[in-house]
Each structure stands twice: as structure tokens, then as C-alpha cells.
Amino acid sequence: MADEELKANGAEEQKDLQSETDQTALIDDAADEDRASDDNYGVDMDQVEAVLNATADKSMMTPQMQRMMARQAESTKRVEESIKGTKSNPRWFVPLFCALMLIGLIWVVAYYLTGKFPIPAIGVWNLVVGFVIILIGFLMTMWWR
């Protein structure tokens, strides 16, 4: 009799656990669908901000809120203008200076390991060539924006 009660209680607990995990899975699936649908709207944030700013009822705002909105708009303008004025390097700039520093390092290591290569005729000047290549790459990092 006690065994039957334990089995019945165990079966009920198992059903409860299964229903809880099913509910958790449903909630997770719903959250994933919500995130996916948010990504599919395709609305530009500038348009959203414009609508939000246009719908603000300025007659219902306190003077402090009006000043705060004016300061925010001014700050946004300044940031946008400063971003427009920035210059950036071409896409090849970073890979070039990284490659130069690596080539110079490989040049120096190759000379140390072999004693005469990469250019056997110049001897110890191979070190100078390698360090100059590294230096050119390093100097390019200072112009990186």
C-alpha cells in the first residue's frame, strides 16, 4: 500500500516537473519570437527619435523639462557635427602597418637564426633593414585614426 502511494506521488511530481519545463520552454520560445520580431521591424532609430520628439507636448512640460530637452537637442547636434568632421584611415592602413611590423620581426628573427639570410651579401645590415621595417610600421600607428 505504501509502495503504491509512493509511486502515485512520484508520478504526480514527475507530471508537475514536466509541466513546469514545458511552460519554461514555451516562455523561452515566446521571448525568442519577440526578439526576432523586434529585429524584423527595420525602423531606423532616427525616425523613432523624430517621432518621440514630435509627440512630446511642450505645453504640458515644466520649464525644467523644456530646458532639458533643449539642452539634449543642442548636445545631439554638437555630437553629430563632430562625428561628421572626423576623418578615418582607409581600410588597408591597419593591415599594412601590422604586416610591416610582422615582416620586420620575421626578417630580424631569420637573420638571428641563420646568420646570413634573408640577404647574405649585406651581413649584419640585415638587422638594420629589419628594424627599419618595424620602425616604419610603428610610425604608421601614430597616424592611425
Image (cartoon, rainbow, N blue to C red):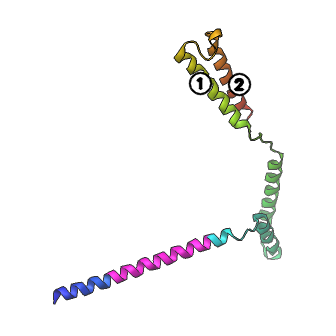
- Horizontal and vertical percent for residue 72? 78, 60
Residue occupying image coordinates x 66% and y 70%: 38
Q: Which residues are magenta?
A: 14-35
Q: Which residue is mark 2?
A: 136
User: Relative to the observer, which residue lies in front, 139 or 126?
Assistant: 126
Which secondary structure dominates the residues rendered in magenta?
Answer: helix
Instruction: Tell me, yes or no, whether the highlighted magenta stretch contains residue 61.
Output: no
Query: Real-space Cα distance between discs 2 and 1?
Result: 15 Å
Instruction: Tell me, yes or no, whether the highlighted magenta stretch contains residue 22.
Output: yes
User: Relative to the observer, which residue lies in front, 82 or 92?
Assistant: 92
Quadrant where the N terminus sits is bottom left
- Horizontal and vertical percent for residue 127? 62, 15
Q: Secondary structure at mark 2?
A: helix
User: Relative to the observer, which residue lies in front, 27 or 68?
Assistant: 27
Q: Is residue 105 left or right of residue 54?
A: left
- Horizontal and vertical percent for residue 128? 65, 15
Q: Secondary structure at mark 1?
A: helix
User: Relative to the observer, which residue lies in front, 125 or 30?
Assistant: 125
Q: Which mark is residue 106?
A: 1
Residue 21 vs 110, above or below: the answer is below
